[in-house]
Image (spheres, coloured by chain):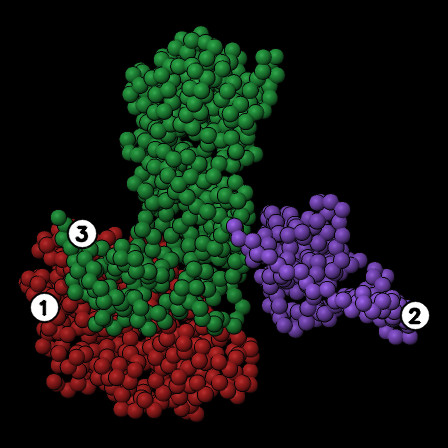
Chain colours: A purple, B red, C green
């Protein structure tokens, strides 16, 4: 086995040969830090960071965060359990169990709809695959959980986060192909939903 | 050729005679003479005579009758059937009804001769359910014929056996189609059967069957009686004989006219029928029942009423129902009524017809409701083009042909209607 | 030799027996002619008008299904005219179709979808409201009918007329109002209902059993032989190997069954899913405590027990006829050939009517391999009869009984009862699939087995014809073994422990 000898990097002898030189450099650095600290403390200049979670960041409209399921105006999930999102999902994170809806008009509905958010790659293919505008990726980016169970979002959680941005009532009628979706007032993703309607995503 | 315009009454010979429908009147005026003459001939000779006479099917397709008879397998010993298609359902046609009204015995005689020619011992007359009076007359005539020895196990002492039964359909247009009629007669849903096999090989109850139109069968006794040559002197070279024309529309004297084929249509309208009612002009004409493509007034000039001449104009003689469309009528409404009729009458078996007729009717409903779209004309043309010749029977073509011709020839009027949402 | 005709199909000379239709010839030549109403097992209806082909010299397109090939005919399936006809035929089929593919179980194996991708791909011209028809009709025990999706190809009507001869279905009304239906107040009531789901080219008939359970594109199908009766229908088993679950059986064209299979056979997947299966091996220690163990542990326990007795007199074998011939061979080679056991009995249903036959497919002998078992018994030099021999087992005086249970408990109404009787004996080792064996508290020893789609082998049907199982699914149960593997492990154990 051949041994390759790697030479040590050359030592910059100036640092040591300059005697007290490095102390002045440290002092200069500390002064700079102190200056910025003071400026920011006194809010003389705009800062580039946020005081999260007290302050929330504004993300682009196209941001794809935590999923939510939209509702029909009768309050039930719009999802018909067609499995197209699950088929399209590259991360294999959507688990659906379909069942026969008691209302014959509706036929099929999801008995269970679960997203394993730890597996999700937030690609948004699920919302693109959805033929009935039932699943969307919302603006939420903060996700916390303490154990494995918390990371599997159930149908109820996905559909009923009204205090956040889930549970959006989409007024799209079953027979209407291109709906005008009204965003709930004051919701942060109002613009986003409008853009969906504009592009006729259904 | 003789004088092609000589008017000889063949199928309507008993028109206006007192007590015309009675057997006595019929026999006294030379009835059943054709049958007696046929019995002196061989069955093959009878077929040859009809072939030589050039008789063509009067139901609409114009297929040579003698040739149709010759398709029946001669050495088949099993039962064969003659069926008289009296289910006259083509809109605008009322000729078979008129023949039945003039003298039903002529139909019976024609059937017996046909039965003798192909070796059938059983005949059925399939009549429209709505011909209440005609059904009674036919049944009386059958009874009389049995009593007179013209029907039964030993007809006129020749040993030839022939029985005729009467059957009333339930009024479906499709049962006027040969195989649809057979399905209905068999007690099934009136739906045309897939061809091949053709009915002459496997028809009623999968036995050789000849289905002929009433008018065709009614012309047979005359041909046998007077000979093929006499028949050939009337009409044109390729369409010999006479034909009943059912003239309707705003003419002075609408009705049934028996005329030799090759008769000029203008002469029929202007002289025989006395011209149009005052204040109306011809806008268009449907020459052969509602399934025939429409002809404009322009195209009627110099047109003669025979299979070839009308085919040359892109339409067809069909059942001979000449419907005159005058300038007070809306082509949109005409088209709507036409497609609605075919939509209602499509049996729903073949997809292009089932969906196509429904689609056309659907589009027309939209146009009538003022929801027409600009490309509807083009769309209707495309739909009809793709319905043509794609189905088991001709109902699809029957819906497609008039649609195509109306859309093409009167497109401007329909486009105008679509634009305004109502008639101009 | 029968007469043949030669004609040109897309420019290639094709020779077929006289009377063959162009459709059949094209299928033989792997030329795709789109069709809906034509089905190889049914009569020709010629109503979908989809299989249009061009015959040179004829003015109109002809339908391939009713066109008999004649000498010198020049048929083309790919002319512009034919292609346009196919496209329009599909458009006509689809204008009133609800297009509810997302909730339709047929999606993924639907004729309309497949043909749209292969011959369609047009922009629909339909701009008007569609015709609405009744949906979700209950027409039979196993069927849900959606008349809106129906394309009225009449396959189901012909199936009812020609195959089951019940004539239970008809087309009512006419034109585009026509709907398929049963006669008023009546329902389809026979053992071949689910065939309607298979022959329906669209999602008009869907199976109540499979309804909404899974999308078909997640499923894998593998050929197998139905274990439900001695007819031995060729089937395709549809399962999802990732989740180790099975969903349905469909008939595959085969000599024994033609194109069909019965509804009883359709359920021959339900005993295979994990929730009803024996998942682990069971042993009982000297103190009588039962415990779950792995395969090796169960073999060791059984090996020790056999070694402790004189096998030729103290071991009895109770075998059912639902396993493969290969398995029987290794079973008898070991127990009869090596151990010299004479006490071999059959596990049969006491109430079975062996010669019963419904006239189509379903037979009274609910064992797939009765013939195979009988010939294996004969080969092993044992008397072979066809009777239930439980009483003989009980009175045989054997200390160890090895019970190879039937694979499909549902075909044995007395299964649980016989199980209870057997557990009364001294020691019975159950080799089984049934989870109920473990549920029985008295069971002392059990080894999980593989199901029919998981093993390789042969079933011999009532006619003596062999049906092959040769592309196995992975076994949902980790310890699942077939008889050959169990015997091999037992032999191995005996070998390494010096007993002979």
Q: CA distance from mark 2 to mark 3?
A: 116 Å
| Residue underneath mark 3 | B79
Look at 32% across and 65% down and name the residue there.
C52
* Helix, strand or loop at mark 3: loop
Between C193 and C165, the one lying in front of the other is C193
Q: Chain of mark 3?
A: B
| Residue underneath mark 2 | A38
| Residue underneath mark 1 | B48
How many tags in the picture? 3
Between C430 and A104, the one lying in front of the other is C430
Q: Where in the figure is residue B65, as x and y percent of width and height?
A: 18, 69
Q: Chain of mark 1?
A: B
* Helix, strand or loop at mark 2: helix
Regarding residue B140, the answer to whether it shows in the image is no
Q: Is residue B302 above or below residue C2?
A: below
Q: Chain of mark 2?
A: A
Picture quadrant of residue B299:
bottom left
Q: CA distance from mark 1 to mark 3?
A: 22 Å
Q: Are marks 1 and 2 in contact (CB under 8 Å)?
A: no
Q: Where in the figure is residue B424, as x and y percent of width and height?
A: 53, 88
């Amino acid at each position: 086995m051949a041994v390759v000898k790697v030479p040590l990097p050359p030592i910059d002898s100036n640092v040591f040969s300059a005697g007290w030189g490095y102390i002045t450099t440290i002092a200069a650095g500390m002064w700079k830090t102190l200056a910025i600290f003071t400026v920011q403390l006194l809010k003389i200049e705009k800062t580039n960071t946020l005081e999260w979670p007290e302050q929330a960041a504004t993300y682009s409209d196209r941001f794809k965060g935590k999923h939510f399921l939209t509702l029909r105006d009768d309050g039930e999930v719009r999802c018909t359990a067609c499995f197209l999102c699950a088929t399209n999902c590259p991360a294999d994170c959507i688990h659906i169990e379909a069942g026969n809806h008691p209302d014959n008009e509706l036929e099929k509905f999801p008995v269970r709809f679960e997203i394993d958010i730890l597996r999700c790659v937030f690609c948004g293919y699920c919302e693109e695959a959805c033929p009935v505008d039932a699943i969307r990726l919302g603006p939420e980016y903060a996700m916390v959980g303490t154990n494995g169970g918390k990371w599997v979002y159930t149908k109820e959680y996905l559909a009923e986060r009204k205090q956040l941005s889930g549970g959006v009532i989409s007024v799209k009628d079953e027979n209407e192909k291109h709906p005008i979706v009204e965003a709930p007032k004051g919701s942060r993703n109002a613009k986003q939903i409008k853009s969906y309607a504009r592009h006729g995503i259904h | 050729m003789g004088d092609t315009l000589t008017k000889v009454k063949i199928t309507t010979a008993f028109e206006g005679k007192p007590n015309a429908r009675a057997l006595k009147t019929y026999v006294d005026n030379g009835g059943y003479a054709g049958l007696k003459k046929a019995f002196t001939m061989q069955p093959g000779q009878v077929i040859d005579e009809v072939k030589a006479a050039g008789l063509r099917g009067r139901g609409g397709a114009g297929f040579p009758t003698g040739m149709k008879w010759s398709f029946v397998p001669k050495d088949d010993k099993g039962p064969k059937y003659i069926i008289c298609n009296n289910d006259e359902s083509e809109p605008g046609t009322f000729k078979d009804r008129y023949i039945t009204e003039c003298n039903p015995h002529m139909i019976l005689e024609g059937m017996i001769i046909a039965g003798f020619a192909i070796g059938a011992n059983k005949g059925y007359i399939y009549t429209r359910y709505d011909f209440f009076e005609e059904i009674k007359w036919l049944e009386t005539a059958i009874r009389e014929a049995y009593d007179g020895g013209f029907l039964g196990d030993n007809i006129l002492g020749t040993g030839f056996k022939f029985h005729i039964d009467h059957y009333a359909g339930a009024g479906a247009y499709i049962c006027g189609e040969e195989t649809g009629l057979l399905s209905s007669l068999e007690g099934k849903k009136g739906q045309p059967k897939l061809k091949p096999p053709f009915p002459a090989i496997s028809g009623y109850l999968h036995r050789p069957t000849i289905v002929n139109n009433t008018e065709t069968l009614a012309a047979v006794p005359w041909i046998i009686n007077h000979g093929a040559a006499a028949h050939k002197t009337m009409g044109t070279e390729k369409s010999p004989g006479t034909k009943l024309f059912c003239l309707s529309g705003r003419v002075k004297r609408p009705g049934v006219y028996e005329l030799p084929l090759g008769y000029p249509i203008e002469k029929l309208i202007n002289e025989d029928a006395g011209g149009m009612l005052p204040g109306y002009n011809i806008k268009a004409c449907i020459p052969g029942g509602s399934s025939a493509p429409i002809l404009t007034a322009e195209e009627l000039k110099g047109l003669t009423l025979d299979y070839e001449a009308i085919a040359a104009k892109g339409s067809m003689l069909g059942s001979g129902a000449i419907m005159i469309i005058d300038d007070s009528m809306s082509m949109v409404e005409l088209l709507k009524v036409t497609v609605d009729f075919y939509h209602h009458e499509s049996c729903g078996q073949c997809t292009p017809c089932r969906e196509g007729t429904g689609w056309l009717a659907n589009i027309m409903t939209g146009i009538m409701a003022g929801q027409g779209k600009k490309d509807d004309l083009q769309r209707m043309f495309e739909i009809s083009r793709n319905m043509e010749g794609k189905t088991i029977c001709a109902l699809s073509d029957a819906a497609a042909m008039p649609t195509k011709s109306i859309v093409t020839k009167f497109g401007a009027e329909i486009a105008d209607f679509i634009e305004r949402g109502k008639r101009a | 030799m029968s007469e043949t005709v030669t004609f040109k199909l897309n420019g290639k000379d094709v020779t077929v027996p006289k009377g063959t239709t162009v459709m059949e010839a094209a299928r033989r030549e792997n030329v795709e002619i789109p069709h809906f109403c034509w089905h190889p097992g049914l009569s020709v209806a010629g109503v979908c008008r989809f299989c249009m082909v061009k015959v040179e010299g004829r003015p109109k397109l002809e339908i391939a299904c009713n066109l008999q090939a004649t000498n010198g005919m020049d048929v083309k399936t790919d002319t512009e005219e034919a292609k346009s006809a196919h496209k329009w035929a599909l458009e006509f089929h689809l204008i009133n179709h609800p297009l509810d593919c997302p909730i339709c179980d047929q999606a993924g194996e639907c004729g309309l979808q497949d043909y749209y991708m292969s011959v369609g791909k047009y922009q629909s011209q339909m701009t008007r409201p569609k015709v609405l028809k009744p949906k979700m009709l209950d027409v039979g025990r196993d069927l849900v009918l959606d008349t809106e999706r129906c394309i009225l190809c009449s396959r189901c009507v012909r199936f009812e007329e020609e195959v089951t001869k019940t004539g239970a279905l008809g087309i009512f009304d006419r034109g585009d109002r026509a709907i398929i239906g049963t006669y008023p107040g009546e329902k389809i009531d026979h053992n071949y209902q689910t065939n309607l789901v298979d022959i329906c080219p669209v999602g008009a008939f869907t199976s109540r059993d499979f309804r909404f359970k899974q999308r078909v594109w997640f499923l894998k199908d593998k050929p197998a032989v139905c274990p439900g009766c001695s007819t031995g229908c060729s089937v395709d088993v549809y399962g999802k190997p990732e989740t180790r679950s099975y969903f349905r059986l469909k008939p595959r064209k085969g000599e024994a069954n033609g194109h069909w299979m019965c509804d009883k056979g359709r359920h021959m997947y339900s005993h295979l899913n994990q929730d009803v299966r024996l998942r682990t091996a069971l042993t009982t220690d000297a103190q009588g405590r039962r415990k779950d163990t792995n395969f090796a542990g169960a073999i060791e326990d059984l090996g020790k027990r056999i070694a402790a007795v004189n096998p030729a007199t103290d071991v009895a074998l109770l075998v059912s006829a639902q396993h493969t011939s290969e398995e029987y061979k290794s079973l008898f080679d070991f127990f009869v050939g090596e151990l010299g056991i004479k006490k071999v009995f059959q596990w049969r249903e006491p109430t079975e009517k062996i010669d019963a036959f419904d006239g189509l497919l379903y037979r009274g002998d609910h064992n797939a391999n009765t013939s195979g078992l009988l010939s294996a018994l004969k080969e092993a030099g044992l008397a072979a009869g066809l009777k239930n021999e439980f009483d003989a087992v009980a009175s045989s005086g054997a200390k160890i009984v090895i019970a190879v249970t039937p694979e499909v408990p549902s075909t044995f109404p007395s299964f649980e009862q016989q199980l209870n009787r057997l557990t009364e004996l001294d020691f019975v080792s159950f080799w089984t699939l049934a989870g109920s064996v473990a549920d029985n508290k008295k069971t002392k020893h059990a080894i999980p087995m593989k199901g029919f789609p998981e093993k390789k082998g042969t079933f011999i049907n009532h006619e003596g014809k062999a049906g092959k199982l040769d592309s196995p699914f992975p076994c949902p149960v980790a310890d699942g073994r077939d008889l050959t593997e169990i015997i091999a492990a037992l032999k191995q154990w005996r070998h390494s422990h010096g007993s002979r």
